[in-house]
Amino acid sequence: MRRTLIAMLLVAPSLLSAQRQPTDSLAAAAVIGTARYADRRTAAADGYRRIGPDFPGMGEHWLNTAMLLSGKLDANRPTILIYAPIAGEVKLLGVGFVTTTRGDETAHDVPGWPAAWHEHSGLLADESGVAPSASAQGGTHVWVLHAWTTLANPDGKFTPDNWALPFLRAGLDLPAHADADAARALAMLNGGDVYLRDVLTDAGLRTPARSVAVDSALASSRERVASVVSARRASKALSPDELSALCGEWRAMSRSLRTLLGPDIDQYLAPPHASPSDAHQHRATGEP
């Protein structure tokens, strides 16, 4: 039986008593403290296990249950390690820390609260960008602080989604100004299509009757993205026109899926991972 993140996190104590520590200092300490986990075998030996999917803008989450249950904020043994396979080699990209709240409670003595934290629900479909809802067990909310320790995030060190990752995985240079939609289209070449398929399946939108049509739309989009990338000039940099074509492909695919599945799909194509201030304010649009 698949164990969801929420099932494990709901039993974790709150980090309300954690020592106040600036987020930059915490991230800097984590760079040094987690260097040994560049080898994922070391992480596994220390109790880290993969949970959930490979997120297009985040990679894999590896959770240490003992640290989760301890409630400690430890730069040497973070609650979560973030990995991603890049060019055939698994890389440690960042870390994550966890705190919980109940109802409308606010976390205290937690560095970076609330701006740097986002809510996890633990369900694959919800992790795609749907506003997480309070759990049935007393309205417990699970919050995660991500810190990108080895892969710079153009949107900020503590921004959950790092859209440099799809470019890196595709062997391309990160443009100075890349639209997230271009990155999400590019992610289709490295598992983003499988991720989206699974999200729609978990959401009950990719039903057996619709699966062939959905899979065809995803496959066609992936092929068009591949064509854009393969047609580029010899350099690793995409031209403005090529980046624009990727953005257009993501939006065209979104419209195709909306036609197939209806407006309910909008929330699953919205930008993932909301902060506390807008966790329940996702705006569904016909063109995410």
Image (cartoon, grey):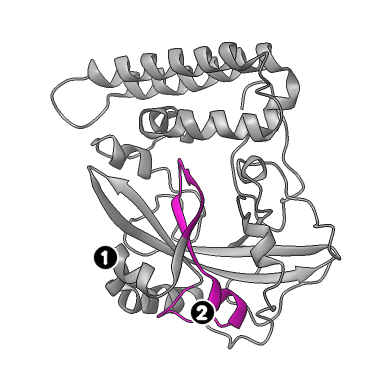
Instruction: Identify the residue shown where x is 40% and y is 50%.
Output: 154
Residue 271 rendering spot, x and y as whole percentages: 59, 39
The part of the chain drawn in magenta is: 50-78
In terms of sequence position, does the residue under pointer 2 or pointer 1 come before the other? 2
Instruction: Identify the residue shown where x is 33% and y is 56%.
Output: 151
Q: Nearer the viewer, residue 18 or 53?
A: 53
Q: Nearer the viewer, residue 288 or 54?
A: 54
Residue 22 image label: 2
Instruction: Identify the residue shown where x is 28% and y is 72%.
Output: 35
Marks 2/1: CA–CA distance: 27 Å
Q: Amino acid at mark 1?
A: Asp
Residue 146 image label: none
Mark 2 or 1, which is nearer the eye? 1
Q: Which residue is mark 1?
A: 39
Instruction: Identify the residue shown where x is 23% and y is 15%.
Output: 231
Using the image, determine if residue 123 lies above or below residue 214: below
Label pair 2/1, CB-CB below 8 angstroms:
no
Is residue 146 toward the left or the right of residue 224 in the image?
right
Q: Is residue 151 magenta?
A: no
